[in-house]
Image: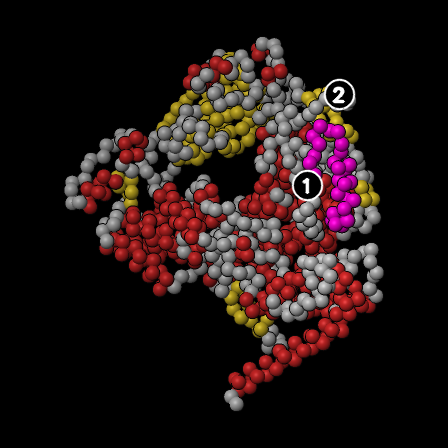
Amino acid sequence: MSRLAFVVLLLACAQVATAQDSASSFASAVKPLIEAHCVDCHGPDLVKAELRLDTLSQNLHEPATLAAWVKVHDKLVAGEMPPRDSDRPPTAMLNGAITWLRQHLQTASLEQQQKSGRVVLRRLNGTEYENTIRDLLGLPDLKLKEMLPDDNSAAGFDNVSAVLDVSATHQLLYQEAAEKAILAAIPAHPIIPFSDTRTGRVMTQKGPNFQQALTRSCRLEGDSLIFYSKLPRYGLCSTPSVPTAGRYRVRISIGAVGEGVKFVPAAFLTVEQSGREDPVVREFRDIPVGKPQVIEIEFDLKRRQAFVINMLSTWDIRAFKKPIEEYTGPGLIVDWIKIEGPIDSFPPVSYERVFSGVPLKARSVVNAEAQGKKPPTIAENRTEQNWLFDPLMPSSNQPKADAERLIRSFVQRAFRRPVSDELQRHFVDGVHRKLDAKESFLDAMLYGYKAILSSPHFLLFMEPGTATVNAQEELASTQLDDFALANRLSYFLWSTLPDETLLAIAARGELRKPDVLREQIERLLGDPRAQRFTENFTGQWLDLRKIAATIPDPHLYGDFDGTLLWAMPRETWSFFNEILRHDRSLLEFVDSDWTMLNERLARHYGIPDVVGNELRKVSLPADSHRGGVITQASVLKVTADGTQTSPVLRGKWVLERIIGKPPSPPPPDVPAIEPDIRGATTIRQQLDKHRTIAVCASCHVHIDPPGFALESFDPIGGYREFYRASARTPGGIVMLPNYTGRAFYRGLDVELGGETHDGKKFQNIEEYKQILLADPDQLARNLTEKLLIYATGADIQFADRAVVEEIVNNIRTKNYGLRTLVHEVVQSRVFLNK
């Protein structure tokens, strides 16, 4: 017998022996528990028909079987199986079954990871795709995500490989998006200078129907415009629309007026002339009260966009019934606005990224040269309208040589790793075939670039690894190579492709060194692109992406406005950044004695002495009900429907996002609660009917406590002691302080307090937070799992649990620091392996 055959025979015998030992130990460790305490519900009588334990296979290498036994293990550990009201099994029997399951589930899960990796082949999601092309081409405002199908989510995130499919529709739309991106990189015409200066008086004459705003929300003082409220679209304090896209320099003579105020917040926006696109807020400034000063700023504007100044105000000027000249409240005064540009370099950076060294010529000139005709003369003072019908396009005198040079350079950057000469030649040959077919240089290059940007090498995370062997000469894992690690790190912290520095370290094979990796984590976190990590991670972990999904009822919540909506997510982003930047404890996501506020949010929270629109760290008063993210307005808004709050929604959110113990889905035959918006009953009374149903009570005992703890906060995150009602109630009318003319009816009082599933009572949100903080490891465990899922693009598997526990143990000694946690995640086996 050959040596190889002998080894194979030994391995086969070992597997058979292992399987026999496993079956034997199962029969002694797990089967007695099932037969004595589980088959009544999960046996032949099928009381729990979804899980039959007496016939469930013990082959843990089958994914469905493995998942079923993981569920059994977790129910046993949680004490939910057998049910609490049934006879309890002997402690030794229960612990023996749990130990056997834990050991064998760990082994089976780890073997599966060693065989094929944790992460199945995954593609860029819409956000990553858009960011990658923006950064690859130097087009920061390019919108491509809206062209693609929506991404599915799993385990709370939309970058999980298991649900990121690739269809024929995807491929078609990727090619369309790639064409849009490449064409956007080509300037349609040379820079056409534009300049305009307008005084406040001139603006009122140029703006359509501006007279409707005069004497109501604004007035003229000499040539200056003073306005006291947000101006409507028909009367904007703005420049004219610019004729060509580019970067513009804007100078403004602006000041503020108003008794008793130091600053007046102003918004700088861009507005499209056609009105087809919503205004885009580019910047906020706190304008000091006093003599106008000149401010100079720069903005990128699209063709037919205008620069606009507007006032941020919750004050409804219509409530002031006297002549506008007698109003002494806050306002902005604008003497003049001057705009000039474009001030960009030419050709732009985007063109150099894809057509570096290739001349730009008018299309008529290119066509004439191709036909051997005399090129037309292009007038130096040619207008943009002329250029629209005869745009610039790249024209090469050595098309094949330029095509090969450009394609070879681009494909290396696009694929984010070294590319073989054979693969480079594949794309070059495709472009050359188009040129041989007499297609234009632009069309041939478009073909090549579209092929690259819709290639699996661009769209998918190529994660080849190196097999490693442990001390026992057994296959231990499949490590990511340095380029795959560079990609995983960059998309984790930047949501985009790695930069040249990271790729250069990967090329030297040094990225896996712990000290080097730590240094690069710090560098990436210190880069402005790390804001994408903050927004993308919190947008999904805390559901902040849904911040604008609902519009609060204006009759009930007249104190809600766009300024508050703008500030809500920024408080949470700034809060997350502050904890991350200074390695503060992740426990502060549950409770803290500080938060990030501007004047508008502080007024909403009832916190005095915060002036201006800039968010800053503010110590909370001792009697404040705020602290942590769960009492921030952003979270409280996304966990409500705009009109009513639901302890079920908020309780489920806390269990899933903060505690990490999501409830089971509700039974299909139990109707949802319809809130009584007339204020006749409280939600607590309505939930009573659910708790009378046994199958509902088992979940609501977990869901309701955190939901009721947050019931003191309304749908826009304001603290309340009673509900707002839309119909007349015995409580009468309540006027909103600081919001003249806005009122609602007083409903029933909010019922405070509750009791957790394990009997811990609380009277308010402050006491409930302390209950959560009593188990800091669980809070850390939950956030660790969330970060691992987001960082790797795969859900937590059983073999990952040991890694999670190791990370939690490590960060416990560092006060559960968030920055420390990010480092631990990246240095973990789960992150470093396929």
Residue 50: which numbered mark, if any?
none
**In this rendering, is residue 662 above or below 276?**
below
Residue 174 in view in this figure: no
The boundaries of the magenta stretch are 672-699
Q: Provide residue 181's location: percent of width, then percent of height.
A: 39, 45
Q: Earlier in the sequence, mark 1 or mark 2?
A: 1
Q: Which residue is mark 2?
A: 732
Q: Provide residue 30's location: percent of width, then percent of height.
A: 75, 69
The amino acid on which the numbered mark 2 sits, given as a three-letter code, is: Gly
**In this rendering, is residue 267 above or below 512?**
above
Residues under labels 1 and 2: Cα distance?
Answer: 30 Å
Asked if the residue under mark 2 is in contact with the one under mark 1, i.e. CB atoms within 8 Å, the reply is no
Residue lying at the far left in this picture: please name it.
373
| 672 vs 111, nearest the viewer | 672
Q: Provide residue 348's location: percent of width, then percent of height.
A: 37, 42
Asked if the stretch drawn in magenta spans residue 632, the answer is no
Decide: few, some or many residues near mark 2? Use Cα within 10 Å; few <14, some 14-19, many ≥20.
Answer: few
